[in-house]
Image (cartoon, rainbow, N blue to C red):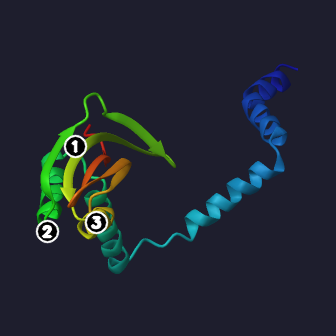
């Protein structure tokens, strides 16, 4: 009797684990088996694929840079304004506009910049088009156009995104 009790006590944890496994749904076991199979058939990326990942990472870093990099954004806006001969450009960050955003699990921050300038219709359209296609991701939050002969008076708010530095 002593031998049987000791034997049962010795293997009791294994029996408890087996009982727990029996309680798990078959779907979970199937999922675990699939994961094990995927891990066993994993092929590491080759040099070409790593180069593509690195290139894509660079594009993302240019679209949504690490840190605010507001001077680079001002430089972009100024160069486009000069390219399209926009006049009386005024730009300033909107106070207390820095906020956190998250879409599809991608955390980022953004801040708003108010722009005021004048230009002819064609120049304003080209400016907005180039701004939309720029390497830096910006969103037009609002835009107000007023006819002020011979030019359009434009007042707009842009939102620029960045990845917060840790």
The residue singled out by tag 3 in the image is 121
Look at 73% across and 28% down and name the residue there. Answer: 10
Q: Which mark is residue 83?
A: 2
Q: Position of residue 7 (x, y in %)?
A: 79, 28
Residue 137 located left or right of residue 72:
right
**Furthest residue to the front?**
149
Marked residue nearer the N-terminal end (3 or 2): 2
Q: Classify 10 as above or below 108.
A: above
Q: Classify 79 as above or below 115.
A: below
Residue 40 located left or right of residue 56:
right
Quarter of the figure that contains the C terminus? top left
Marked residue nearer the N-terminal end (1 or 2): 1
Q: Nearer the viewer, residue 89 or 47?
A: 89
Look at 75% across and 35% down and name the residue there. Answer: 17
Q: Residues within 10 Å of mark 3 (few under 14, many from 20)?
A: some
> Dot 1: what SS?
loop
Q: Residues within 10 Å of mark 2 (few under 14, many from 20)?
A: few
Which mark's residue is nearer the viewer, 3 or 1? 3
Q: Classify 43 as above or below 158.
A: below
Q: Nearer the viewer, residue 154 or 126?
A: 154
Q: Position of residue 56 (x, y in %)?
A: 34, 68
Q: Nearer the viewer, residue 13 or 92?
A: 92
Which mark's residue is nearer the viewer, 3 or 2? 3
Label 3 close to label 1 by CB (< 8 Å) = no
Q: Which mark is residue 2?
A: none
Quarter of the figure that contains the N terminus? top right
The residue singled out by tag 1 in the image is 68
Distance in Å between CA atoms under marks 3 and 1:
31 Å
């Amino acid at each position: 009797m002593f031998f049987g009790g000791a034997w049962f006590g010795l293997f009791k944890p294994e029996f408890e684990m087996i009982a727990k496994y029996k309680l798990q749904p078959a779907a979970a076991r199937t999922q675990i088996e699939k994961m094990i199979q995927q891990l066993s058939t994993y092929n590491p990326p080759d040099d070409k694929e790593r180069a593509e990942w690195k290139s894509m990472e660079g594009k993302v870093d240019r679209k949504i840079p690490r840190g605010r990099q507001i001077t680079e954004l001002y430089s972009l806006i100024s160069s486009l304004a000069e390219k399209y001969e926009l006049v009386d450009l005024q730009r300033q960050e909107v106070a207390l506009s820095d906020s956190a955003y998250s879409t599809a699990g991608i955390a980022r921050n953004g801040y708003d910049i108010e722009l005021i300038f004048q230009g002819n219709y064609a120049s304003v359209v080209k400016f907005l088009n180039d701004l939309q296609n720029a390497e830096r991701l910006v969103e037009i939050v609002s835009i107000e156009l007023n006819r002020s002969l011979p030019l359009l008076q434009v007042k707009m708010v842009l939102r620029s995104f960045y990845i917060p530095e840790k």
